[in-house]
Amino acid sequence: MKKVLSLVLILILVLTVSGCAAQQDDGKIKIVTTIFPEYDFARAVVGANGHVSMLIPEGSDMHSFEPTAQDLADISESDLFIYVGGKSDKWVEKVLENINKRKTKVLKLSDVVSFGDEGEYDEHIWTSPSNAAKIINAISESICEIDAENDIFYERNAEKYIDEIVDVAELTKIVIAAAKHKKIVVADRFPLKYFTEYYGLEYTAAFGGCEHDTDADVETVAHLINDIKKDKLSAVFHIELSNKNLAETVAKSTGAQVIELHSAHNISAEDYKKGVTYVDIMKRNAYALEKGLN
Ligand SMILES: [Zn+2]
């Protein structure tokens, strides 16, 4: 009798626990993303119909990221998982072997926009507005497949967000067209290849991509200083969440002002809390260029 009772008790317990879990499940679409641009785009498209989370903690460097057990659980419980598919999220491939693809839809950004195999490898594809638009459309398509009933809502959200990005791109083009210089010197890692190509900006950067550490040798420093002096540039740029050491060294010997250009790759904890968007970041870049190119 005792045994039967405890069995009943266990059953009740199990039922209550799963009942609780079911109550927390509000039926909204669960989207898990690796980095900020995916997070921001998915948030804009899914609106109030979904929960979007970002695995790489805000303010941290994605290039040294390792997923926790909780991250893996979140991915396998999601309806849509979005990742880049580059060198810096190689860990994802292993994770994907163990998830139920019928439950979780997977969107890999490198299937939407290629990294460009000729010349320098660069996976920061979202820094170009036209690539950003392609990515947003792909996210919208994936969400529509999950929730076809509301497809018009998602498509409209995508369109609206792309319009905002186009507006910022236009503003940036105007700034660059009116600027005295069309060249930037970035004394930092360089995740802005697609950005500069889109706007037709020339650049000199201390390090290609952003896999390298930021210890520059003497020649690199000399090269950056020389480029600023030669073209009489007024600014030296660094990227987000940088220690700025190199930019400050270059500034000291050139008198150039130190300005941030943001690749939207990593977002600071403060900006994240404030709900800063990709569009906000690109607006900041337009003002940064207005200051730094004149
Ligand atoms: Zn990067």
Image: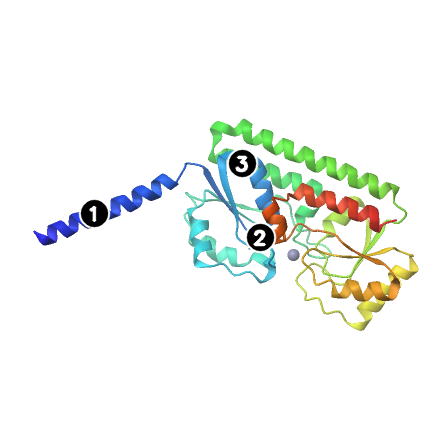
Residue hosting label 3: 46
User: Disc 3, disc 2: CB below 8 Å?
Assistant: no
The circle drawn on residue 78 is none
In the displayed structure, 219 sits above or below 56; it is below
**Nearer the N terminus, badge 1 or badge 3?**
1
- For disc 1, the neighbor class at 10 Å (few under 14, some 14 to 19, many from 20) is few
Q: Residue 90: give x, y in percent of width and height.
A: 55, 58
Query: Dot 1 lies on which element?
Result: helix
Residue hosting label 2: 85
Q: Residue at x 52, y 52 (%)?
A: 55
In the displayed structure, 59 sits above or below 135; it is below
Q: Is residue 279 visible?
A: yes
Residue hosting label 1: 11
**Nearer the N terminus, badge 2 or badge 1?**
1
Kind of residue indicated by mark 1: Leu
Query: Dot 2 lies on which element?
Result: loop
